[in-house]
Image (tube, rainbow, N blue to C red):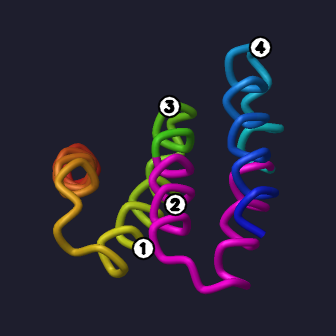
Amino acid sequence: GKVLARNLRQKAFKDYSMGNVKKAVENFEEMASIYKSIDFAPGITAAFFSLGLLHEEQNEIGLAIEFFRKVLKISPGHIQAQERLFDLEKKNNR
């Protein structure tokens, strides 16, 4: 499972670099699903954080907030997710 998930991660970054954000999101979602099925929290965290960033970049703020909250539920000390969530909630409440 971990090898397949890592391959999806690499594919997602390649898709992103080629401008195919939709495919990158799909790959990260599949990566998260694989990591969930093997109960590998660090992988789930990485996938959710990446999805949060991608949704933020696409100006899908509600989805980005949702993914950063999921990251913090798994890993409460995730500093980058805390910062992104704080910034987005601040922007979203204006």
Q: Which residue is mark 1?
A: 70
Residue under the point 45% across and 67% down? 42
Q: Which residue is mark 2?
A: 48
Report the amino acid beneath label 3: Glu
Q: Are marks 3 and 4 in contact (CB under 8 Å)?
A: no
The mark nearer the N terminus, 3 or 1, is 3
- CA gap between label 2 and label 4 equals 21 Å
Q: Are marks 2 and 3 in contact (CB under 8 Å)?
A: no
| Stretch of the chain drawn in magenta | 27-52
User: Secondary structure under badge 4?
Assistant: loop
Q: Residues within 10 Å of mark 1 (few under 14, many from 20)?
A: some
Q: Is residue 63 above or below residue 69?
A: above
Q: Find residue 18 and name its label.
A: 4
Q: Is residue 20 above or below residue 70?
A: above
Residue under the point 66% across and 66% down? 32
Return the x and y of residue 16 as percentages of the image width and height. 69, 25
Q: Residues within 10 Å of mark 3 (few under 14, many from 20)?
A: few
Report the amino acid beneath label 1: Lys
Choose between 25 and 33: the one closer to the eye.
33
Q: Which residue is mark 3?
A: 57
Q: Residues within 10 Å of mark 4 (few under 14, many from 20)?
A: few
Choose between 25 and 58: the one closer to the eye.
25
- CA gap between label 2 and label 3 equals 14 Å
Q: Is residue 47 magenta?
A: yes
